[in-house]
Image (spheres, coloured by chain):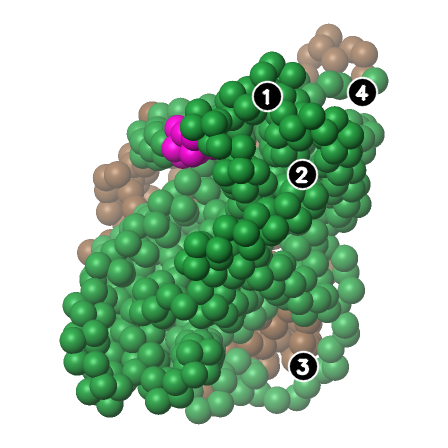
């Protein structure tokens, strides 16, 4: 995935400004940033969900805005804060996504059952997705993104609201996926996860890309959290405010 | 501490103002709403003031209670069928505040009174005060003023209580059938009234209408509007009694609303029946029988399930069914021609798709990331809607044929229905891509975004008007051909409707291919 000069305004506010980012094939790429930094906006523009005001996004070499069909066919996306078609049951939803991607029926059936089993969502589960817990919905979304075996995964906050057991499972799946030659880009604001998983990171704040590159180079000899807080310009409580607490 | 009603009113006005800020399209819609309300108010005032200015107490005794009843019933039905309720003050948002239910109810009621519809209604019915003043002097005028205000309170109470109850009913899946029956009963109640009025008006049988007016005058829907007339006639006891009837009705409705409000605040009742596990294959579970195992099949199957499983869509289907069954009954008794009705019904069926992407909300992102071509997307949605609508239209044509005692007309009526449905789709499909809007994240299927009622109403009005104009040639041909039309009506109607649909389908698909991300942004509710 590579982004070239992406810009997005909302009304008069500049949400993302001139983001250039190259994600090498086969890398595990973490996009870090505080709340409201423009992570979701950037990823939405990259996968063709939000039209950028300027700039280009290439997915596996295909321009996501000039040739969307080719680009979208090769990418799996887990958007954040977006509902699934949650009035379907889990198996129905996976079948829907599979057929939407133009897959063979037999392949859809086989992969859907396997995904439901591995992610512990229940193969014969007939509860509607709307009645799932937040963590189950996240896993369901991930299953939908994985179903067509894309070579690039773009995941927005894949670990949010997921319990530790499921998070470990998802980490495992993603690591194996990268080891098999796939590329993962995901956003998060949890340092530990990024530090443990990623070989590359980028730090975004106020819509500007502050730092990016291989993890070791970005981090140097400090912890990622120190670098992050310094780059973003956060403040540390001095002890004099909120004295009434 | 219980806050007064002012904070609620201020909150509502603030929400309205913020909704308009920096959005020229919204402002234009709002101004149009102001103009239309003004026109309604002036015409209403004039009509209700005529009997007084002309000094015709007899006419007043008919016009005031019946006119008042029409207004009250309008407040009851228009939100259910066309407009939805402006739920910018969603009760669920107040659930965490330390508010007593009485205070909350008072506040929400005051907020509901704040708005164009209430203002326009008050101005229109003020014409009745003029009439009362002309006929009975200041005392009657004061009495009628009290009555008109009571009438307004009744209107608002009725619309809030019924939509709230209906929404609560539809929310739990088990009681959806009950809700359908309740609406059918309301529709049935408006039927006879309309029939008698229309029949009476056509035969100029003012005696019968007068009797009806007298009866209506003693029901809550007509009573408040007759208070001034009773005073003018010197019957103080009747005036007091009618005021009492109105007040009791308002009190009862508020009590009912308060009961359903509790439900709305707590949210969905988790009375989901546990479904047993299944070992059928996922694809077989999703696809309806006889649909191709392709993208198109998957989209149609999902749409069909959504029409039934999602409350908003289900509400629109049920409402349309009821209107479809009861409108012909109403019109047949008054002996008017079914032609106009048929075109109206077909176009109204298509209106169900006017904000089809809004129903999906942000879930539509799945189709955007999968890169579904516009032609498949639009075509599958229309197909799924037609699966529900065509049988319904068939039933409507049978009902019309049976009521007019002319079964031979059923096929040609069906043809005309399909033609107008196709024309309606042809207009609605591009509109649904171009003018989509997000529904609020409320579980009330009638809830509309602030200002959305006007948008929805205008779109509905435009599509109805457009469909009637576009279907007019066919209607004229039908009239000219007479008996021949009975034979060729069905194929010609199908061809006409299909052609109109194909044009709209093409336009909508091209628009969608260009604007899918913008459409997604438009239907995603603000977080």
Q: What element carries label 2?
A: helix
Mark 3 is surrounded, within 10 Å at the Cα level, by few (under 14), some (14 to 19) or many (20 or more) other residues, namely: some
Q: Is mark 1 on a helix, strand or loop?
A: helix
Residue position marked by numbered label 1 in the rendering:
B136
Q: Do labels 1 and 3 share a chain?
A: no
Magenta-colored stretch includes residue B47: yes
Mark 2 is surrounded, within 10 Å at the Cα level, by few (under 14), some (14 to 19) or many (20 or more) other residues, namely: many
Q: Chain A is drawn in which colour?
A: brown
Q: Do the residues labelled 2 and 3 touch (CB within 8 Å)?
A: no
- Please identify the dominant SS of the magenta region: helix
Residue position marked by numbered label 4 in the rendering:
B2
- In this rendering, the answer to whether A137 lies above or below B66 is below
Q: Where is residue B33 in the image (x, y as percent from the top left)?
A: 38, 33
Residue position marked by numbered label 3 in the rendering:
A124
Residue at 57% across / 48% down in the picture? B210
Instruction: Quadrant for residue A115, please give it.
Output: bottom right
Residue at 55% across / 20% down in the picture? B133
Name which of mark 2 and mark 4 comes first in the sequence. 4
Mark 4 is surrounded, within 10 Å at the Cα level, by few (under 14), some (14 to 19) or many (20 or more) other residues, namely: few
Residue position marked by numbered label 2 in the rendering:
B223
Q: Where is residue B505 in the image (x, y as percent from the top left)?
A: 25, 67
């Amino acid at each position: 995935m590579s982004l070239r000069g992406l810009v997005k305004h909302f009304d008069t506010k500049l949400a993302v400004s001139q983001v250039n980012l190259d994600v090498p094939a086969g890398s595990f790429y973490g996009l870090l940033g505080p709340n409201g930094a423009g992570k979701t906006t950037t990823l939405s523009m990259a996968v063709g969900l939000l039209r950028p005001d300027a700039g280009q996004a290439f997915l596996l070499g295909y321009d996501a805005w000039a040739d969307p069909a080719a680009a979208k066919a090769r990418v799996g996306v887990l958007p954040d804060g977006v509902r699934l078609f949650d009035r379907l049951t889990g198996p129905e939803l996976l079948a829907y996504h599979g057929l939407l991607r133009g897959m063979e029926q037999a392949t859809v059936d086989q992969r859907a059952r396997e995904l439901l089993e591995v992610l512990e969502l229940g193969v014969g589960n007939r509860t509607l997705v709307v009645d799932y817990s937040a963590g189950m919905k996240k896993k369901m979304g991930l299953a939908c993104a994985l179903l067509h075996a894309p070579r690039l995964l773009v995941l927005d906050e894949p670990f949010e609201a997921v319990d530790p057991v499921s998070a470990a499972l998802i980490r495992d799946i993603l690591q194996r996926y990268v080891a098999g030659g796939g590329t993962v880009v995901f956003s998060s604001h949890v340092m530990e996860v990024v530090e443990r998983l990623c070989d590359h990171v980028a730090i975004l704040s106020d819509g500007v890309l502050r730092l990016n590159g291989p993890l070791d180079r970005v981090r140097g000899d400090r912890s990622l959290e120190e670098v992050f807080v310094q780059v973003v310009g956060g403040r540390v409580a001095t002890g004099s405010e909120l004295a009434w607490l | 501490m219980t806050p007064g009603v002012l904070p609620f009113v201020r909150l509502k006005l603030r929400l309205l103002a913020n909704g308009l800020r920096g959005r020229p399209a919204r402002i234009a819609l709002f101004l149009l709403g102001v103009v239309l309300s003004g026109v309604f108010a002036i015409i209403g005032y004039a009509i209700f003031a005529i009997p007084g200015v002309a000094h015709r107490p007899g006419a007043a005794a008919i016009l005031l209670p019946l006119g008042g009843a029409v207004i009250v019933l309008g407040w009851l039905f228009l939100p259910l069928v066309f407009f939805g309720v402006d739920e910018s003050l969603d009760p669920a948002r107040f659930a965490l505040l330390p508010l007593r239910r009485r205070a909350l109810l008072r506040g929400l009621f005051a907020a509901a009174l704040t708005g164009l519809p209430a203002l326009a209604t008050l101005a229109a019915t003020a014409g009745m005060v003029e009439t009362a003043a002309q006929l009975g002097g200041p005392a009657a005028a004061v009495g009628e003023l009290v009555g008109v205000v009571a009438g307004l309170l009744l209107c608002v109470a009725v619309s809030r209580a019924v939509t709230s109850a209906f929404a609560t009913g539809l929310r739990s899946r088990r009681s959806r059938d009950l809700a359908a029956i309740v609406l059918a009963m309301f529709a049935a109640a408006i039927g006879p009234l309309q029939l008698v009025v229309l029949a009476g008006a056509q035969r100029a049988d003012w005696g019968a209408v007068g009797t009806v007016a007298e009866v209506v005058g003693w029901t809550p829907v007509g009573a408040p509007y007759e208070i001034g007339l009773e005073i003018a006639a010197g019957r103080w006891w009747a005036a007091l009694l009618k005021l009492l009837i109105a007040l009791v009705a308002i009190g009862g409705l508020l009590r009912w609303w308060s009961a359903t409000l509790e439900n709305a605040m707590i949210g969905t009742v988790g009375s989901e029946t546990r479904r047993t596990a299944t070992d059928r294959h996922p694809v077989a579970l999703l696809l309806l029988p006889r649909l191709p195992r392709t993208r198109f099949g998957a989209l149609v199957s999902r749409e069909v399930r959504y029409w039934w499983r999602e409350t908003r869509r289900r509400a629109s289907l049920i409402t349309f069914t009821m209107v479809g069954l009861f409108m012909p009954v109403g019109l047949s008794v008054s002996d008017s021609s079914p032609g106009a009705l048929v075109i109206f019904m077909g176009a109204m069926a298509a209106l169900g798709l006017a904000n089809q992407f809004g129903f999906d909300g942000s879930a539509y992102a799945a189709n955007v990331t999968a890169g579904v071509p516009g032609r498949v997307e639009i075509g599958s949605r229309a197909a799924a809607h037609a699966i529900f609508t065509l049988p319904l239209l068939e039933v409507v044509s049978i009902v019309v044929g049976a009521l007019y005692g002319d079964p031979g007309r059923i096929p040609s009526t069906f043809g005309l229905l399909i033609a107008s449905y196709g024309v309606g789709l042809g207009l609605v499909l591009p509109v649904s891509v171009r003018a989509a809007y997000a529904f609020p994240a409320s579980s009330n299927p009638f809830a509309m975004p602030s200002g959305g009622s006007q948008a929805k109403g205008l779109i509905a009005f435009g599509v109805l008007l457009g469909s009637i104009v576009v279907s007019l040639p066919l209607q004229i041909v039908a009239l000219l051909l007479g008996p021949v039309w009975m034979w060729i009506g069905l194929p010609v109607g199908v061809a006409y409707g299909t052609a109109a649909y194909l044009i709209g389908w093409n336009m909508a698909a091209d628009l969608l291919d260009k604007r899918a991300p913008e459409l997604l942004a438009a239907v995603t509710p603000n977080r």
